[in-house]
Image (spheres, grey):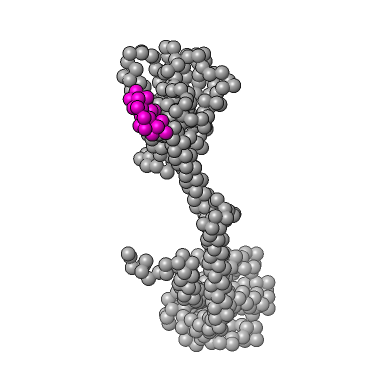
Amino acid sequence: MGLAARILPASLVGRLFAGSLLLFGISIPLLWSGFTAAIDQVAKEVVDTQLRTFGSQLRGYWASASASGVLAESENREGVITKSAPPSLFGESDVEWLWQISVEGRPVYRSTFLKIAGLTLQPATNVKGPDFTVHDINAEFGLIRVAERLVVEAPPLRSGLQSGNTVNPGAGIPVHYMVALPAERYNGYVNEYAGRLRRLTFLVTIPTSLFLLGIFAVMVASIRHSLNRVDGALSRFHQGKTDRIEGAFPTELQVLVDRVNDLFGQNRKLVERTRKYVTKIAHDLNHPLAVLKNGLQGPVDTETLNRQVDRMTGLVDRYASLARAIGPGGQVGGPLNIAEVLKDIRDGFSILYRRTPLAIDVKCVPELTFLLPRHDLETMVSNLLGNAHKHAKSRVVVSAAIENNSLAITIEDDGPGIPKERREAVFNWGKRLDEAPPGTGFGLSIVRDTADLYEGTVVLDESAMGGLKA
């Protein structure tokens, strides 16, 4: 027995319950880590959105400055424009929020920190688009988070930006906007927002886990209820209240119940058949035994007693042949090659009745197979072929084919046949067998009983050759 089998409960419901608890225990850290990662991403997106919003405000600042005509018009020795717009146009609440406006690649306006430190931000080359692009860059003073956008703005209404050449008043001006936060400050904002949102993790993780546990509990209860219904149906069967497992169950259980019911049905057939054979044996042996008993009390008539013994031997052989039918529950061993079995039976009859030659034709494709015990097939075909052989004039035809997923075997002869009104009577073996002449239907009863074990039938009809078709 494996380690898992020793640890897990023996009950299926117990195993399902243990699995539910395990999943519940696993779900809490998984949900916690999942929600935490989602919260961190949301907090990061919140700060990035603030950067974009600041950038949009910066663009508004440029528009206001451009409309008012307050623009930088001079450069220092390093080529940096130093004139700034009045502070009233744009205020800064946090000196760590960095920003810069560049026109035609030259910084025009900068935040207080950048001006004091004498630093500029290096714009990226590919940031055109409908919105600000947010990314990380390494600046002179460390890693920063930047939102930037390059926009071709309309030229100022009153004056142009002079940098050695007069700007064409009708041409657009490439303006590069940049808003940034140092990485440490950026992460501080992210952690601050994430910390506020993490309080919601408890409100989401625990109820979600409990909800999942509730679903597992309902599933386990539903399975247990279905199993209890099957157990109740089995109890009614064992108490003799029903002859099968009754009730409608979930598909997976219904398949098992149907198969068990089929097994019960086959067992009933076998029991009924056994009872019938035992009853018939007792009944049919009673007469010859009485003859033997009375014959031994007086002068012994050896010839009469021998006939009774032969009659009893014949009865035992016939019933033994019928009792050997295996049925669907027997050992099959795989699909049976039907053509090989039919040819073996034909060859056996050719040797057995060598003195009365008769043409026996087998019509069956070599590759035809069917799941059936060989002995049962031989029993049915041999009995039918034996009857045909007794009454045929010169020819018997045995054919086999698959029809509607069933095996159909046909045996025809050119004998006198059986009148339509007497065909059903030949299957009746309720009369005393020791009083019936040889070959008057016992073999056909064997065939019908055996075929019935496989939900098959035996039909007698008129052959195209004029005789009987079975």
Nearer to the camera, 123 or 246: 246
Across and down, in percent, residue 378 comes to 39, 30
Where is 74 relative to 256, above or below?
below
For the stretch drawn in magenta, the main secondary structure is helix
- Residue 75 visible, this angle: no
Say which residue appears at 34% left-offset and 27% top-offset: 300
The quadrant of the image that shows the N terminus is bottom left
Residue 382 makes an appearance in the image? yes
Q: Residue at x 49, y 42 (%)?
A: 272
Q: Position of residue 7 (x, y in %)?
A: 37, 71
Q: Residue 389 location in percent, x, y?
A: 41, 18
User: Magenta segment: does it hold 299?
Assistant: yes
Q: Which residues are magenta?
A: 290-314
Q: Residue at x 44, y 19 (%)?
A: 388
- The residue located at (44%, 15%) in the rendering is 392
The one of 348 and 37 positioned closer to us in this rendering = 348
- Name the side, left or right, on which 350 lies relative to 54: left
Q: Is residue 432 magenta?
A: no
* 166 to the left or right of 354: right
Between 170 and 105, the one nearer to me in the picture: 105
